[in-house]
Every structure is written in structure tokens, then in C-alpha cells.
Amino acid sequence: MRLFLFIFKRDMLLAIRRRRELANPLVFFIMVVSMFPLGVTPDHAFLAELSAGVIWVTALLAALISMDSMFRSDYGDGSLEQLLLMPGSKVVLISAKIAAHWVSIGLPLVIIAPLMSFLLFLPPQALPSLIITLLISTPILSLLGAVGVALTLSLRGGGVLSSLLTLPFYVPVLIFSTMAINAAAVNQPVSGYYALLAAFLIVSILLVPFAVVAALRVSYN
Amino acid sequence: MFTFLHKYASPQYFYSWSASWQKWASIIAALLMSVGLYYSLLNSPADYQQGETVRIMYVHVPAAWLSMFGYMVMASAAIVTLIWRIKVAEIMIAQCAVIGASFTALALITGMLWGKPMWGAYWVWDARLTSELVLLFLYFGVIALSGAFDDERAGARAAAILTLVGIVNIPIIHYSVEWWNTLHQGPTVSKFDSPSAHPSMLIPLLVMALAFKAYFFAVLFKRARTELLLRERNTSWVKALLKEAV
């Protein structure tokens, strides 16, 4: 636990020192969402129907482009290698890094999501489910993204490849989340979707750090 | 048992014993394929609703089964790679991925050809089509990752980890798209006590499925042997082999 807190604090401090980088995925999120009315139609009813999917796909992309920051700079300056050489559980260490990444990237996405829902006329009764699905699912995005990043860490241009590897694994998250939001928009029960997403989250928390540690071993060879 | 495993999995031994396996797999594939094609294309009833287009099924269904079977073989090779670091298994991963991706593409293409007259569209966003498409993406990821490393052995281990992450995710992806949207007909063969397919169609289908499996192993051994020679080109046994051949 002390190791977890130590790494978590270290990564949060680093994130706060690089405030400008933190804003990039958010700006990307806002920009891409605002492209849809321009590209498709500004029509109120049509956008309302589209909004859950658009917000979710854009959030996926924003999470993807920010995945690189999880390990890449630490890998570049060698500090990741030093951290891995520390005594203590590597799984805990990786979990702390992923948690810090989620707080610095995923959580801000959740916070500005209501703003996006106004831009796209999401039905107001669906807003709570948008926030809840994002809250449950963005940690899953960070966890699964960590595998892709860790596998491609030692490669040139690994960023694009890592997105290609990760995106198929995001399919269930996308499906359950948008189904929940669309169900909420027509006042249908949604707790089943939340339960599925939460189950997916728990399984990911339990299994993914082991896969990331194994992947980092390959990258350090 | 493990010394036995290591002996038969060493590149040199593998190269010698896999030659006859490859030969027999090819022969079995050719025999079953000719029998299966004869029955499925000429000597089986046309469907009372689908007419002659039902014959696409005899290629489509075995290809779709093989696309999943190929992933299972790849996952087994991945486990062996990560635990024992056996070179032959490392080679198998990328080769399985290429063959598996080809059959996934074949299943999708034959499905499209069948879908046009039956459903009226080449592509619908149906659950099975979508999960097959995602499977194709997973194969592409394994192929891309295993080829991206300068060190082939590191590439194989990275691909092995990705394969195993995929095997945990495949059922989740499958059921998520199932709930999302489904138009595809339900399984008609797996209900073994009372299959809803008539024997006159079921038997050619099973023969074709076995033929595809045999073909899979024939190609897998062929590709693995070639790749093995390429990777081991600087070892003494390959040089001795080449001298013998010349």
C-alpha cells in the first residue's frame, strides 16, 4: 500500500507539473465532438439520437491518444527501469501508475462530458447514465490501454500500433455504455448495464496489471 | 515428460518429424476436400428456401469455425511460448495469425456473398459478423505486433501476451455484440442430440470442416518449417541440411 501511494503521488506530481499536456486530450475531446454537428447536421433531433455514440467514441479516441503518456516518458528517461528494479510488488507499482493516469486523464474527461452532452443535445434524463458509464468505464480504458502501450514501448512509432492493438478490446465497453445511455434516454432500466460494466472493471483491475508486467518484461527483454 | 517435449520441440527435431506430418496433413486435406466438395457442390440437396446459394455454407461455416480454431491453436502456442520459450512455438504464433486471418477474411467474404441474395445486403451490422470482424482486427494486431520487433523472439513473446489478453476478451466481445444486435441464424449444428440440419447437409459440412482443419495444419507446418529455416539459417544443422540438398 505504501508503494502504491508513493508511485501514485509521484505520478500525480509529474502530471501536475506538466499541466499543459493534461489539457490536450480534453481539447481534443471538445474539438472532435464539435466537428460532428458541422460534418453531419446541426439538426436537434438527429444529433440527440447520435449523441451517446459520438460522445463515447470521441472519449475512446481521447483516452487512446493520451495512453502514451502512461509509460513512454518514464521509459525514455530510464526511470521506469529504475522503478521496476525497486523491491516490492511490480503489480502494485503498475496498478498505481494506471490509477494515477486515470485520475489525470480519465477523470477530467468524465467531468467535461456534461458539457459535450449539451453541445449534442443529449436527452437530459440520459445525462446521469452518461456520467456513470464514463465513471465506471474510463478506468477500463486506462487499464486495457496500458497493455497496448507496454507491449509497444520499445518500438519506434509504437503509439499508432498500440492504438490498433487496444481498440478491439474497447468494443464491449463501448457497446454496454452506449446501450445504457440509450436505454436511459427512453426511460428504461439501466442497472444491468452498470453491473456488466462494473464486472468488466473488476476483472480488468485483477488481471490487467499482470499482463502489463509481463509486457514490460518483453519490452526490457 | 518435459525433456521429451524439449527434444521434439527443438528446431532440428521439429524440422525432421514435421516433414511427414505436413505430407500426411496435405494428403488428408486433399482427399477430404475432394469428397467434401463433390458432396457439397453436386450431391447434396438444394435448400427449399435458400435454393442453390445454400452451397456457400459448405465453405463459409468451416472457414468460420477455423477462424476460431486458429485462435485456439495460436493461444496454445502462446502459452507454450511464455512458459517454456520454445522456438517452434514462437514461430507458430505469427504463422497461425496469418492463416487464421485469411480464414476469418474468407468467412466474412463468403458470408457477404451469401448475405446479398438472402438478406438483401452484403453487410449488416449483425452480432456474428461484427464479432468475426473484431476477431480479424485481433489477428491483424498479432501479425503487426509480432513483425514490429527487430528481435524476432521478443516479437513472439509480445504477440503471445496479446494473444492471451485476447483470449480472455473474445467471449466478452462475443456476448456484448450478441446482446447488441442479432440477425444471424442460431447455431444448427452444435445441438448434437438433435441437430436441426438434415444429415444430407450435415455430413458434407462436417467432411468439409475436417478438410479445412487438415489444410490448416498442412499450411501451418509448411509455413513454420520455412520460417524455421530462415531464422536458423546460421546454425550448423541448417547448413548441413543445405549441403545435403546440394
Image (cartoon, helix red, strand yellow):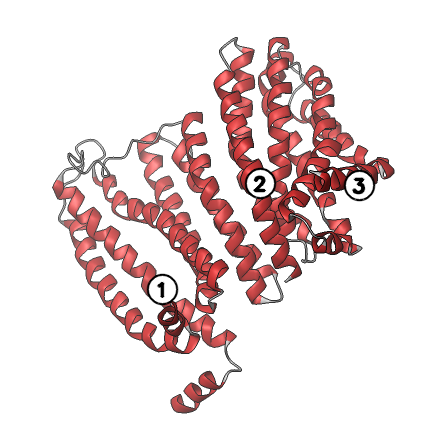
Locate residue A115, reporting x and y percent.
Answer: 73, 18
Q: What residue is pinned by disc 3?
A: A10
Q: Is residue B22 above or below residue B43?
A: below
Q: Is residue B181 above or below residue B107?
A: above
* Residue B244 horizontal/vertical position (percent): 39, 90
Q: Do labels 3 and 2 touch, CB within 8 Å?
A: no
The amino acid beneath tag 1 is: Val
SS label for mark 2: helix
The quarter of the image holding the N terminus of chain A is: top right
Nearer the observer: mark 3 or 2; the answer is 3
Q: Which residue is mark 1?
A: B219
Q: CA distance from mark 3 to mark 1?
A: 51 Å
- In the picture, measured across the screen, residue A104 lies left or right of residue B76, that is right
The amino acid type, in three-letter code, at marker 2 is: Leu
In this rendering, does residue B98 appear at all? no
Which numbered marker is on residue A167?
A: 2
Q: Chain of mark 1?
A: B
* Alpha-carbon span between mark 1 and mark 2: 30 Å
A55, above or below B207, in the image: above
Label 3 is placed on what type of residue? Arg
Is the residue marked by circle 1 packed among few (<14), some (14-19), or many (20+) residues within 10 Å?
some
Q: Which residue is located at x 72 percent, y 37 percent?
A: A101
Could you tell me if the residues under marks 1 and 2 are in contact, i.e. CB atoms within 8 Å? Answer: no
Dot 2: chain letter? A
In the picture, which quadrant includes the C terminus of chain A? bottom right
Asked whether A160 or B151 is in front, the reply is B151
Viewer-nearest residue: B202 or A179: A179
> Residue at (69%, 24%) from the top-left corner?
A110
